[in-house]
Each structure stands twice: as C-alpha cells, then as structure tokens.
Amino acid sequence: MKADTGITIVDRDETGVDKAFRADVLKGLAQRQKAIPARWFYDERGSQLFEDITKQPEYYPTRAETEILRDRGIEFAELVGPDRAVVEFGSGSSVKTPLLLEAVDPAAYVPLDISGEFLRQSAVALSNKFPGLPVHPVEADFMRKVELPDEVEHLRKLGFFPGSTIGNMVPRTAVDLLRSMRATMGADEGQLPMLLIGMDLVKDREVLEAAYADGEGVTAKFNCNLLHRINRELGGTIATEKFEHRAIWNDDFARIEMHLLATEPVDFEVSGKRFSMAKGDTIHTENSHKFTRRSANTLLLAGGWTPLKRWTDEDDRFSLILAQATEQRDAP
Ligand code: AVJ
C-alpha cells in the first residue's frame, strides 16, 4: 500500500457488506464459546462511544497515560533524540500524539491505520497543529509489515503505540504484531528503531472491573453497539434487549473480558445463517490484558524489543515503556 493515495482497502461484496466483518462474525458465532474480534467495535458510533468512555471517572487509562506523556517529555527527548520519523500504529489521538511530537521534535510523522476516514481526519488536524512537520498517512493493516513512504526511508524511526491497545491481543498475536512493527520500521535492514508503547497495569479487581463497567453505562452501550452493527450491516435479527454487558476479571490470564450475556434464550439470523443461545450464554467481545513490570518486559522481549526505560503515572496505574529493537545475535 502506498502513502497518500486515499484508497480505501475495505473489501466489500456486491451488496456493500464488509467481507472481513461478515467472515469474522459468522465464524465467531459458530463457535461453542461465541467470540467476535474487538476491532469490529470501531464503526463511527463505536469510536464515538470509546471517546466517551475515556471521559468516564472509572476509566483511568487515558488520563494516566496522558499524565505520563505530559510530565516526561524531557526524558523521552533525551533518550530518543530529534529528527526521527514517528510512526504511529493507529490514527493519532488528538491529545496524546501532539504531546509526543512536541516532546521529541521529529522530522516526520507517519500515522498508520486501516480506516482511511479516521486517518485523513487526524492527519489534517495534526498538520494544522504542526505546520512545519511532514505528515505521511498510510492506509494499511499494521498487523503485517507495512511499506513506509520513500520520504522517511533514511530517517531513524520511533514507533508509538499508546492506549494499551496491545492488551487487546492474546500474547501470541501481540508477539506477531511486535515483530511486524520491527519489520515495518526496518529492524531487519540494520536500523535499530525504538518503540514507545503504553501498557496498562495489573491492579485490584474492583478498580479494573469498574473501569470496564462505568456507572453511566457508556461501556455497556459500546459493547452492545456491536450487536446493533451486526443487525445493520449484516442483516442481523438479534433482539438486542435480551443482552447485557458483562466485564469480568480473568485472574489466570490477567485480563478483563467483556462479554454480551443472553438474559433469556435467543434465536437469531445473521447473513441468512441461524444461531441460538441459551440463557446465560455469552458472546466474548474483548480481552484487555493487564501487565506487571516483568510480564510487560517478557512480552516485549518475545516480540524482539529490548525495554530501555519505563515510566508510570503518579498512582502507578499505567506504564509507558521505551524499547529498542533487539539486535540479532547468537545466544545467550
Ligand atoms: C482501546 C484497547 C485501550 O481495552 O481499555 C475500553 C478499549 N474497551 N473500554 C481498552 C475499551 C472497553 C480499550 N483500548
């Protein structure tokens, strides 16, 4: 995929259905434990609801991470140095990205996102905020190696992956992504890119469960929006009022799981296929893994990144880790 083409890579059938969405939903609903990948939350409404979640008093990660970015800019700059190309995995957030760009004084900014719409919006907003900074948005699936624009080829890279989005992946997928990031940023061509990554921390169950079940019910709406999206885009007949939001801490896997729980027996169709659920059955819609200092380091090392420095917010709720691509060498 080339930069600045403005091409949308969503693959739709004759009737305008997103084929990947349909395939994931049909496959996920056919399983014994029904499960749908969390990435499908983020249609326009879902993205708006996530924005609203970040403003809820119980949802601390966004505020905690922003606090670190705000307070530690000088330290980032010291370790990272100027004139890098900042490669952001996901469209920039309107608050966090400017804080990083201000701190590290980069030579270019390259946001990567699968959704061209958000990508273009945030690229324009950033260009306005940083008039002298070359911005090269790339519409691509960063779970694979992405070809970066020629203009940044010669620049040293700093990857930016905030939000603890890595926590949405099970470890094996997270490691695949970390390795793709290395490849995207040229680690195999002798460069030693850096990565600044946000990772949320293990803490008391009550605090975690509340963060994913806020009192206003915004997270519940966010979760249930997936059912509405299926009904709208995939000809679904799901009786959405028969489902409830659940957020449960899974201590063995150190993750919050979000589920949609059927409060009574339900039968429905999606894209002409029939499904039925008993009362108490759930659709697993999201994992949000939480880390300790060591588990974070282990995951990064497994993905080919050596942790250099770690920062947390004042209340030790969230971590930002600066890592460098591990040099290829023989054991140990
Ligand atoms: C976007 C992955 C950071 O896991 O905390 C928030 C998504 N889900 N509330 C997270 C989310 C429910 C969020 N991330």
Image (tube, rainbow, N blue to C red):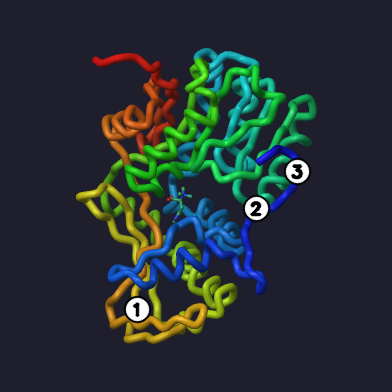
Q: Are marks 2 and 3 in contact (CB under 8 Å)?
A: no
Q: Which label lies toward us, 3 or 1? A: 3
Can you see residue 19?
A: yes
Question: Label 1 amino acid?
Answer: Ala
Give the vertical position of 76 relative to 261 (above or below). above
* Coordinates of residue 213 in the picture (x, y in percent): 39, 61
First in sequence: mark 2 or mark 1?
2
Query: In 3D space, how far apart are the residues under numbered discs 2 and 1 (Cα atoms)?
Result: 34 Å
Mark 1 crowdedness (10 Å alpha carbons): few <14, some 14-19, many ≥20: many
Query: In 3D space, how far apart are the residues under numbered discs 3 and 1 (Cα atoms)?
Result: 44 Å
Asked whether mark 3 lies closer than 8 Å to ligand 1, one says: no
Residue furthest front as drawn = 14
Mark 2 crowdedness (10 Å alpha carbons): few <14, some 14-19, many ≥20: few
Secondary-structure class at tag 1: strand
On residue 193, the disc is none
On residue 9, the disc is 2
Q: Quadrant of residue 165?
A: top left
- Residue under pointer 3: 5
Secondary-structure class at tag 3: loop
Secondary-structure class at tag 2: loop
Placement of the C terminus among the 4 image quadrants: top left
Residue in the foreground of this view, choosing between 79 and 39: 39
* Rendered residue at 44%/71% (across/down): 26
Question: Label 2 amino acid?
Answer: Ile
* Coordinates of residue 317 in the picture (x, y in percent): 37, 39
Can you see residue 313?
A: no
- Residue under pointer 1: 262
On screen, residue 6 versus residue 95, left or right, reads right
Mark 3 crowdedness (10 Å alpha carbons): few <14, some 14-19, many ≥20: few
Q: Quadrant of residue 126?
A: top right
